[in-house]
Amino acid sequence: MTESTRGKSGTAVAEDPSGRPMIEVESLHRSYGTGPAAVHALRGVSFDVPRGELVALKGRSGSGKTTLLNLVGGLDSPDEGRITVDGTDLSGLGENGLLELRRDRIGFIFQSFGLIPILSAAENVGVPMRLRKTDPREREERVELLLSLVGLADHAQQRPGELSGGQQQRVAIARALANKPALLIADEPTGQLDAETGLAVMELLRAVVRSEGVTVLVATHDNQLLSLADRVLELSDGHIVEHS
């Protein structure tokens, strides 16, 4: 068991004995297509994300935000460069290793929610634990805890179609936390929500950093939401152009 330290968010986070950040990105390049028609999504991107922080990526559509999140999450591979997540070099993992990483150590939150329509909120949250074959009693307790964390304890038996957009995104956040990941990756999680609901969802992510001790990397185009981040990285034309 590692000792705990406190991140900028004021929460206790697991301390890596090596003192390494949660995310290390070095000279990342990713292009799509070949020849004159090739699209250079990322051009030599480098940055670190300390443990226990909420770091926001901003940039216009096409700036490379989603490409970068997919690479850090092990959903895609770079043409050049190196990515280390929670001390693991992704380039050293085969498909099975990447699958285990995504299942056990990374939670994903998407703009489209991605909930299963025929399942209740509780059943949707429990899906990752079923895939991991978690003990049923432990799974039920974790589901109850997470729905309470996101403010939906009274909506456990409702299906996605019976919930508002903000409530559906809260269920998606609870599901992303199901297997106690070290890292949450969120791609425009407020993109389908109105301003007030989007701000509430971002405040929830901020609270999750404190209560669960996770690290969050979130892409957003909403300037109002950037103030909730510990740090902001701006992408433009495949480059990091600003740290704040």
Image (cartoon, rainbow, N blue to C red):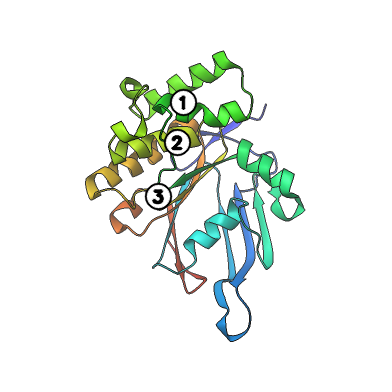
Residue for badge 1: 123
**x%, y% of residue 175?**
47, 33
Residue at the image point whose x is 73% and y is 56% from the top? 91
Distance between the alpha carbons at the discs numbered 3 and 2: 15 Å
In this picture, residue 205 sits left or right of residue 20:
left
Q: Amino acid at mark 1?
A: Glu
Secondary structure category for the residue under label 1: helix
Secondary structure category for the residue under label 3: loop
Q: Is residue 240 above or below residue 49?
A: below
Rate crowding at label 3 as few (under 14), some (14 to 19) or many (20 or more) other CA atoms within 10 Å. some
Q: Are marks 3 and 2 in contact (CB under 8 Å)?
A: no
Q: Are marks 2 and 1 in contact (CB under 8 Å)?
A: yes
Secondary structure category for the residue under label 2: loop
**x%, y% of residue 240?**
50, 68
Residue for badge 3: 111
**x%, y% of residue 69?**
53, 55
Task: State the image quarter where residue 31 is shown.
Answer: bottom right
**x%, y% of residue 176?**
49, 37
Residue at the image point whose x is 33% and y is 41% from the top? 201
Residue for badge 2: 116
Q: Is residue 118 above or below residue 188?
A: above
